[in-house]
Amino acid sequence: MMLNALKPQPADKILQLIQMFKDDPRATKIDLGVGVYKDATGLTPVMRAVKAAEKQLWEVETTKTYTGLAGEPAYNAAMAQMILDGCVAADRLASVATPGGTGAIRQALELIKLAAPAATIWLSNPTWPNHPSIIRYLGMAMTEYRYFDASTGTVDFAGMLADLAGVKPGDVVLLHGCCHNPTGANLTLDQWAQVADLLNAKAAIPFIDLAYQGFGDGLEADAAPTRLIASRCPEVLIAASCSKNFGIYRERTGVLIAISPEAGMRATTQGNLAFLNRQNFSFPPDHGARLVTMILNDPRLTAEWKAELEEVRQNMLTLRQNLADALRAATNSDRFDFVASHRGMFSRLGLTPEQVETLRADHGIYMVGDSRINIAGLNAKTVPILARAVAQVIG
Ligand code: PMP
């Protein structure tokens, strides 16, 4: 007997929230929980360019035999181009396709474990809960740096720098490339430059999680911090996801890029990345990666994809502004103005767990316990409903 030794795993809070929402009979319920883009009708559509690429692929695909261990080179090159735009010489880039952004993060951590098992991973407080969860599972050392000032809804940059001053040589600092999850608060480019200088001075390694390129200030602007770090720091890890910006969540499409300090180290890095894929799942999934490659390498599909991604981004920006305005009116204060300047799919409202629970129980409004809301879960009709309910619970 073996399975009887298993202990129950703690329930995933967000998945629990989804279930509670499903079970709630109220017609007026509002889901601001899980991090999936939804349009005004509550749908997560297949993007037009993705549909077009799928149709083409059905016609031209002649085999489904294994891809390479690192994935298709054309996919890795297209992703490196979208993220880095040539700011690092190609002979310093090693990369592997991975099952989603989560797979890329997992492989990056495994690479760190191979190269520097004693390194400490520094995480923003707060961060996406999967970061500490995977690090703990791998038995690696981690610690936190201050990130969010809950009283203003902005980045606590002084606190962040003060904490990162304690980084040891060879430590790894995980940074959200754009659209910080869960807070929505982000560094300015000038602050990113200061972080790059600090990490270089400490001989620490930046590890960028880029899950929302195109959801914040636009495809290029959202990549700017990653490009700045990649241009200034000798060694960088980048874990990117196509789940959100291509809307292909379930296809599991991501990439891990490892930038070596010099071209001579690329081949061994690449070999280790391929080795790690082999150990964990052999060949990465191809369907989503193939669609992304087709879209990025065909100017017509690229234009169509960019146009739709821009609609998605603008929709979220409009919702942000409308929510900030509605909260200002409902609470008669500027307390929630930060919602308009946050970027990406999330904002952390700064409510207590009790207030979050009251919103759920009395108003049928579902958000994560730390008061993170998914902006895309709102629409023109529900923005004022949320604002009034928030005003009521904060009394
Ligand atoms: N990083 C962050 C910060 C995220 O929010 C997500 C998605 N929730 C991911 C990585 C990875 O997403 P996926 O594995 O679905 O590509």
Image: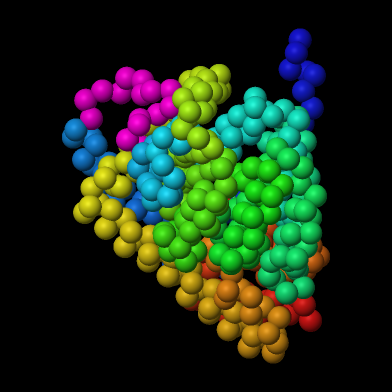
Residue 82 spot, x, y in % from top left: 39, 49
Q: Nearer the viewer, residue 388 or 177?
A: 177
Location of residue 192 in the rendering, given as x and y in whole percent from the top left corner: 60, 60
Q: Residue at x 64, y 60 (%)?
A: 194
Depicted 377 relative to depicted 77: above or below: below
Q: Is residue 288 visible?
A: no
**Of the pair 41 and 219, the residue shown nearer to us:** 219
Q: Is residue 137 above or below residue 142?
A: above
Q: What residue sits 41% from the left and 60% below the top?
A: 220
Is residue 66 rendered magenta in the image? yes
Q: Main secondary structure of the magenta part?
A: loop
The answer to whether residue 258 is above or below residue 174 is: above
Residue farthest to the left? Answer: 59
**Going 38% across and 60% down the picture, which residue do you hit?**
309
Observer-nearest residue: 181 or 373? 181
Q: Is residue 216 left or right of residue 4?
A: left
Image quadrant where one finds the N terminus: top right
Residue 387, by quadrant, is bottom right
Total number of numbered labels? 0
Is residue 140 visible from the viewing direction of this image? Answer: yes
Residue 391 in picture, x, y percent from top left: 71, 80
- Nearer-the-camera pick, 75 or 284: 75
Residue at left offset 23%, top offset 35%: 58
Colouring convention used in this rendered image of the protein: rainbow
Q: Is residue 124 magenta?
A: no
Q: Quadrant of the C terminus?
A: bottom right
Q: Is residue 257 left or right of residue 20?
A: left
Looking at the picture, does residue 207 appear above or below residue 336?
Answer: above
Residue 39 x, y percent position in the rendering: 43, 63
Q: Which residues are magenta?
A: 61-75
Residue extending farthest to the top is 1
